[in-house]
Amino acid sequence: MSPSKDTESVRRWRALLASERDAAVLYSRLADAESGERQQIFRELADIERKHAAHWEGKLRAAGAAVPPPGKPSLRTRLLGIAARQLSTGTVLPLIERAEQADASVYDEDPDAAPGMAADERGHAKIISRLIEGGQPNPRRQIGRREPWHRGDRSGALRASVFGVSDGLVSNTALVMGFAGSGTSRTVTLLAGIAGLLAGSFSMAAGEYISMSSQREMYQREISLEAAELAEKPEEERAELVLIYRAKGLERADAERMANRIMADRGVALDTLAREELGLNPEALGSPWGAAASSLLAFAIGAFVVVIPYLIGGGTAALLTAIGLAIAALFAVGATIGAINGRPVLRSGLRQVIVGALAAGVTYGVGHLIGTSVS
């Protein structure tokens, strides 16, 4: 290792050591503010962080570098500890969860990390999430099982369809109004509308395909990493499951029995770890082609509304008809979105009309100014 590389590594190890020590202090302070099983869980999390810190201390000693003595906890840790003690741990756990999620992959590609450290870090956010739930069943999961209309669209097709129609309607209405305001002929306005429909549809489809493909690849990578860890370190994964179920509110003995049953079947174990530790459903990763097709068709349907009058005629009659159809379609789309989200239908519909009218009004005005100046 070159001197510069060695110096860089030592600096990085010291930074990681300080971070792990700080995390250990934070979890210890959370444990002091709790009691019973939750207190024990925080103490075990602190022990894990101390184990990580000891690893970086060993790396520094092996490199002949000085190991810095433990310093004062960071301001963030001190403030979170005070808030947990004076208020409750529940008030600070969402902040800690976000930080754990941001740091979950810190050791994934680190060649100096010890085996199991990456899995520990990824599991911490899930454990904190279970503690936030307070050991109670997740209400959304219960509602989803009992009332299917509450279930989210994991495939992305519904989301792509709803926003595709809205985007196609608003963007092509604005485009057609801009050309109509410029005073161009019916043929030019019609060509602009069709061009906007095609360009927008394929652009939306391509974007949705790339987005869903990237998301799916990311999920598959997470699941493959979990499968590798399950094969290489089954005892650590079992311990992770035990800790997660204890955080949900199960007694240690019950959590261990459940983890043992799950770990007895490798397929069930991987599926459960993907759901519980990673928050992923391996059976519902979504289809990029399905989302792309839905997005393309939805955008085209929305964009086609204002093109219809110019397929039949032109002039003022076509413009007024296009405006009327656009207003009706905007209200219908907004009302549908409101109904899906459980919001007031009239309010949602009017909001969509106002947004679309503003966009179309601006482009009509700009088109009119440009058309007047050119003529």
Image (tube, rainbow, N blue to C red):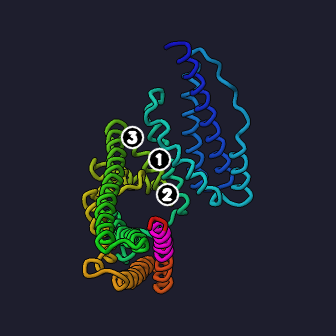
Crowding at dot 3, Cα within 10 Å, few <14 / some 14-19 / many 20+, comes out as: few
Cα separation, mark 1 vs mark 2, equals 19 Å
Q: Above or below — where is 322 with respect to 152?
A: below
Q: Nearer the viewer, residue 109 or 139?
A: 109
Give amino acid for label 2: Glu
The numbered disc on residue 235 is 3
Point out the image quarter for the C terminus: bottom left
Q: Earlier in the sequence, mark 2 or mark 3?
A: 3
What's the magenta bit mostly, secondary-structure-wise? helix
Q: Nearer the viewer, residue 135 or 314?
A: 314
Q: Position of residue 289 (x, y in %)?
A: 25, 58
Q: Judge left or right: residue 315 versus residue 102.
A: left
Q: Which residues are magenta?
A: 356-372
What distance separates the C-alpha of mark 3 from that of mark 1? 14 Å
**Residue contact at pointers 1 and 2, CB within 8 angstroms:** no
Q: Is residue 178 above or below residue 22?
A: below
Residue positioned 43% across, 79% down in the render: 334
Q: What amino acid is found at the position of numbered circle 3 in the picture?
A: Glu
Q: Nearer the viewer, residue 246 or 321?
A: 321
Q: Position of residue 330 (x, y in %)?
A: 41, 79
The alpha-carbon separation of the residues under discs 2 and 3 comes to: 19 Å
| Label tally | 3
Q: Which residue is mark 1?
A: 123
Q: Residue at x 70, y 41 (%)?
A: 74
Proximity of marks 2 and 3: CB atoms separated by less than 8 Å? no
**Where is mark 2, residue-wise?**
251
| Residue 93: quadrant of the picture | bottom right
* 3 or 1: mark nearer the eye: 1
Where residue 83 sits, quadrant-wise, is bottom right
